[in-house]
Image: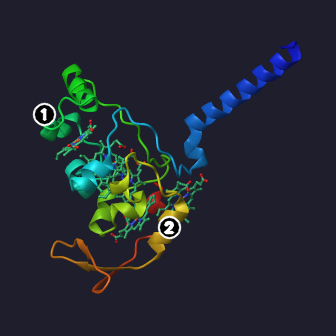
Amino acid sequence: MSLKTATILSLLITVIGAVVLLQGSTFHWFGNQQGYAPVQPIQFSHKVHARDHQIACLYCHSGAEKSKVAGIPAAAVCMNCHSQILKNSPEVQKITRALTEGKPIEWIKVHSLPRHAVFDHSRHFAAGVQCQECHGPVQTMERVAQTETLLMGMCVNCHRTHREVTLDATGRAIVSKERSQARLQASTDCVVCHH
Ligand code: HEC
Ligand code: HEC
Ligand code: HEC
Ligand code: HEC
Ligand code: HEC
């Protein structure tokens, strides 16, 4: 290899490296992470759990009903079943190991908003907005992917639309296409999402 080719090559590698680093540390600035589907430390399948075995989303993401964050279940929750089910599977043994070593499983976050934007799961849950409207058909996924843009345009588009809902006694929405006893319109004020 001539000196010139080597210089050009190393320059190229530096530029590519810089771009990768920049993307990694500042992807929030680019906003759109649609299609992002990182490999997780354990091959956890939503299709197996949420569809084939019909485990409710809230069994593992109970935070979505009550708080801003939906949350990722602790390893102890997995052991409710896996202390019995498939306990000899190498993937399941990673859970056991995490517990005995006292180290949390390092799941890689898929969906994130930049810090200047505010999001609250419980408000959407109470208004009857389905998980799938923002996360796609998670129950069919072997590995979670971000299916939507989660950009401001997506949020505001839905906030602009009226939703036809029926409220139950506790003020929680019962989603219905037929009945329309209440009309919800979420706010589009800047401060609602930026404060
Ligand atoms: C309510 C019960 C239940 C809970 C809770 C649960 N699982 Fe499972 N899991 C299952 C069932 C049922 C299967 C499929 C068993 C089969 O295929 O025979 C399964 C399969 C798996 C497999 C596939 C293993 C293999 O070798 O094929 C992995 C990995 C797994 N679970 C990880 C987890 C993790 C991680 C958690 C916690 C976040 C968790 N599970 C929570 C019931 C549960
Ligand atoms: C048995 C437990 C379990 C059930 C049931 C479950 N999940 Fe999950 N969920 C997890 C775990 C563990 C992760 C983190 C690993 C991953 O991303 O696959 C996760 C990740 C996610 C993520 C990505 C979070 C991020 O990092 O941005 C979404 C979205 C999600 N789940 C939605 C759902 C929906 C919707 C349902 C119901 C259809 C559901 N989950 C059912 C355990 C569960
Ligand atoms: C209106 C849109 C929307 C709906 C509906 C929604 N989510 Fe989310 N979800 C998001 C956004 C946006 C994030 C990223 C939040 C952040 O970066 O702080 C997120 C993050 C998550 C995460 C990652 C952990 C966390 O709490 O940040 C999980 C798990 C999750 N959602 C599960 C669910 C489940 C389960 C439901 C249904 C019960 C649901 N989501 C409904 C928009 C939504
Ligand atoms: C599919 C429809 C839909 C999408 C998409 C959606 N929202 Fe909402 N949002 C709603 C509804 C409905 C409410 C509840 C309004 C109510 O309670 O009156 C709400 C409420 C809120 C609230 C509370 C408003 C208040 O008055 O305090 C915030 C904050 C919010 N959304 C932020 C977001 C953000 C950020 C996104 C994008 C990541 C988003 N939403 C995407 C439908 C949606
Ligand atoms: C329903 C929620 C919601 C409302 C209402 C909202 N925003 Fe946003 N906004 C977001 C989210 C989520 C992001 C981050 C994702 C993105 O960059 O699109 C964002 C991003 C931004 C950005 C950064 C854009 C970029 O390219 O990085 C600016 C500036 C902004 N919003 C200004 C406003 C102004 C001004 C208003 C009022 C007219 C407003 N927003 C109303 C949710 C909202």
Look at label 2 and name its amino acid: Val
Contact? badges 1 and 2 (CB < 8 Å): no
Q: Nearer the viewer, mark 1 or mark 2?
A: 1
Q: CA distance from mark 1 to mark 2?
A: 44 Å
| Residue 52 visible somewhere in the drawing | yes
Q: Secondary structure at mark 2?
A: helix
Q: Is residue 171 left or right of residue 163?
A: left
Residue at the image point whose x is 66% and y is 28% from the top: 17
Q: Give the image quarter of residue 107.
A: top left
Residue at numbered disc 2: 156
* Residue 191 on image: x %, y %: 47, 61
At label 2, counting other C-alpha atoms closer than 10 Å, the crowd grade (few under 14, some 14-19, many 20 or more) is: some
Q: Residue at x 37, y 47 (%)?
A: 142
Nearer to the camera, 7 or 22: 7
The answer to whether residue 112 is left or right of residue 101 is right
Horizontally, is 129 left or right of 23 in the view? left
- Viewer-proximal residue, 83 or 17? 83
Q: Residue at x 85, y 19 (%)?
A: 5
The location of residue 62, given as percent across then percent down, is: 22, 51
Compare residues 112 and 7 and report the one nearer the observer: 7
Q: Is residue 66 visible?
A: no
Question: Which residue is tagged 1?
Answer: 83
Image point (33%, 34%), residue name: 42
Secondary element at image label 1: loop
Q: Is residue 17 above or below residue 116?
A: above
Question: Above or below — where is 171 with respect to 93?
Answer: below
Ligand 5 location (quadrant): bottom right
- Tell whether circle 2 marks a residue whose Cβ is less than 8 angstroms from ligand 5: yes
**In the figure, residue 39 lies in which quadrant?**
top left
